[in-house]
Image (cartoon, coloured by chain):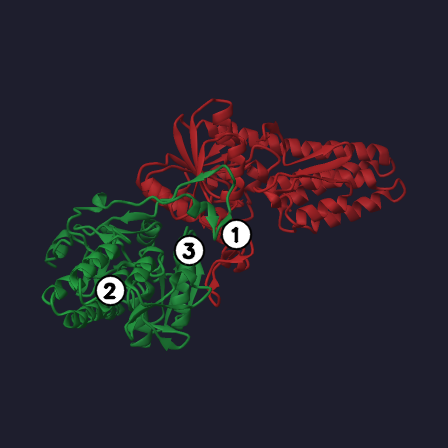
Chain colours: A red, B green
């Protein structure tokens, strides 16, 4: 996608180095960081220089390729084993991370005694992973754009844009596609998404740089916009989708979906099929992270609430399948039902 | 109500001075300010040292009494006319302000040529206005407390506590009454209430000092708490109620009410009958203030959103009567219907 008029991915390979956007500094500063050692890449994933399922997968692949570049000819294989473990330790619950490290590692196994060839193969696979993520998101955009009529006002929650993937994004991809490829008129109402404000900080930044007309709204305001007939559809991303179509996503998604239902506004979830976890029977099986109350009580380190009071900070909620009009995947738009998901014939990710 | 173990009202008279809590400094600092001139009181209302319908009414009454104290014997009546106009110019849309200034002014009219007696009468009426507000809120507490069972988890939005009135408050009064007078076990989930965070700042401060167990929640989280069965009832305040029972209140109230309906959680509005504006046929007739987008884009003067993006800042929304289980007034709990409101036989406030 576009930043200051130029095309960028969230992470890429350049002259034996890994480059990425420093997302912790957004929206206040746009900075590209460059890493020459795989341990720097580990640290970048750990400290959330890059974040989001697809972006983490892409970064992990490039991290493995960087390890291969720096691995000594002698002990090459051992070095790579260590690198794999180090990378996997950064965000142990991110499925895409393991997918990427495994894929690169399996590919170089055949070249244990040919480090030169192994380095080439590692980079090839890493580039494939990034490209696959971008392609998959682009296809989500193409499929999802069919749902968008010119003149639509679209509500989204949190950041499921290209910053969370290698390119294009999930929830925002249909919007980008509709605007850029189909020249449709679109307007986005971006929920600010308390407590971490990813909507106000990241989604608004993305939309601004890609010239998508938009406004930021407090999470409690979108319902009133629906009441006034100002929202035509909702598109959100997802952190995990259960086998029955229940959707876990950033806290507030369930309220948005319920409000959409109450107003007859179609509510869509956009996610690559890799987000579907067929080992989860329903939303009840999806673990919900509760985070530090400080995220609610402070903003950018400044206390905004009464001293002495505590806060609830549930990071995600589960939207039941019945509130979801469809899941926009790279394979097409599917109904969120056990039957339709079964038909995708997905494999569990270890 | 209680602050640091001691009873306070939001505004009171002491030795020919007006004293009030400096609400702009809450929750970080608890400061009492003292005014000796009515023009200082005007400034206090204008700069929101005190805010909220009942508190503004009480303050305006005391402001008139203070003017009477300082008015010269010669030109007493003229001085008071000027004071009335000055006080009324501070928050021209606050109904209670005009109610208070008119009441004091009418009372002193009979003593145009007896400034000494007029001063006594002005203070008497001002004390009556404050006492009436406190009594009215206390009765709201007594009536509303009947709805609260011991062990209830109650959700509230914004600040409709004693800080917005002279004492007790509206939405929080039933909670105070249930806890203090009836020793019921209550727990409050206070919506932080973006953008101005009156829940996190004022409601949490009140509850903390009055030893009501509570937690602050992001506005987008209360729906998820309802989904988990953690909310037994909602009580909110109101800025204006139409003749058919539609309720205007702080933005987010409509979403909260809709979520409550979807989960079978009873949703109550607590407000003195003076909040009912019988000149408004329905919610459509209630003007909705849109405020500066900076309130959304900045917190305490710090930019929290992408530079270049704009924001929606609708300050209030309208909850249709059908979502409201009852209106808790000083006269009892009434169904929000045209018939029940008609039966109150209210007069329009000019």
In this rendering, does residue A226 appear at all? yes
Q: Residue furthest front?
A: B74
A214 to B111, vertically: above or below: above
SS for callout 3? loop
The residue at which mark 2 appears reads as B67
Q: Earlier in the sequence, mark 2 or mark 3?
A: 2
Give the residue at x 29% y 75%. B15
Q: Residue furthest right?
A: A74
Instruction: Kindly indicate whether the residues beneath marks 3 and 1 are on one polypeptide chain.
Output: no
Q: For marks 1 and 2, give the one nearer the viewer.
A: 2
Give the residue at x 16% y 51%. B243
Which mark is drawn over residue B275?
Answer: none
The residue at which mark 3 appears reads as B197
The residue at which mark 1 appears reads as A286
Q: CA distance from mark 1 to mark 2?
A: 65 Å
Q: For marks 2 and 3, give the one nearer the viewer.
A: 2
């Amino acid at each position: 996608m576009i930043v200051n008029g130029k095309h960028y991915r969230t992470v890429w390979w350049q002259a034996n180095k890994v480059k990425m956007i420093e997302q912790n500094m957004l929206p206040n500063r746009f900075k590209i960081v460059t890493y020459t050692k795989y341990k720097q890449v580990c640290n970048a994933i750990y400290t959330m220089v890059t974040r989001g399922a697809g972006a983490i997968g892409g970064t992990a692949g490039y991290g493995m390729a960087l390890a291969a570049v720096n691995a000594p000819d002698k002990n090459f294989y051992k070095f790579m084993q260590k690198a794999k473990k180090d990378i996997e330790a950064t965000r142990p619950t991110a499925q895409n991370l393991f997918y990427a490290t495994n894929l690169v590692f399996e590919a170089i196994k055949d070249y244990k005694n040919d480090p030169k060839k192994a380095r080439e193969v590692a980079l090839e696979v890493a580039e494939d992973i990034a490209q696959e993520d971008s392609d998959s998101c682009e296809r989500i955009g193409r499929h999802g754009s069919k749902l968008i009529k010119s003149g639509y006002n679209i509500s989204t929650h949190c950041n499921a844009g290209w910053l969370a993937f290698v390119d294009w994004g999930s929830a925002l991809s249909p919007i980008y596609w509709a605007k850029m490829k189909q020249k449709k008129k679109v307007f986005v109402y971006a929920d600010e998404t308390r407590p971490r404000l990813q909507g106000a900080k990241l989604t608004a930044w993305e939309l601004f740089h890609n010239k998508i007309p938009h406004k930021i709204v407090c999470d409690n305001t979108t319902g009133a916009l629906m009441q006034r007939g100002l929202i035509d559809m909702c598109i959100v991303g997802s952190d995990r989708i259960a086998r029955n179509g229940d959707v876990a996503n950033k806290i507030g998604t369930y309220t948005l979906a319920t409000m959409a239902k109450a107003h007859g506004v179609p509510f869509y979830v956009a996610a690559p099929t890799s987000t579907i976890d067929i080992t989860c029977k329903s939303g009840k099986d999806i673990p919900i992270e509760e985070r530090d109350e400080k995220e609610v009580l402070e903003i950018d380190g400044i206390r905004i609430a009464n001293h002495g009071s505590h806060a609830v900070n549930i990071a995600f909620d589960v939207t039941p399948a019945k509130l979801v009009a469809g899941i926009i995947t790279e394979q097409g738009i599917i109904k969120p039902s056990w039957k339709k998901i079964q038909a995708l014939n997905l494999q569990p990710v270890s």
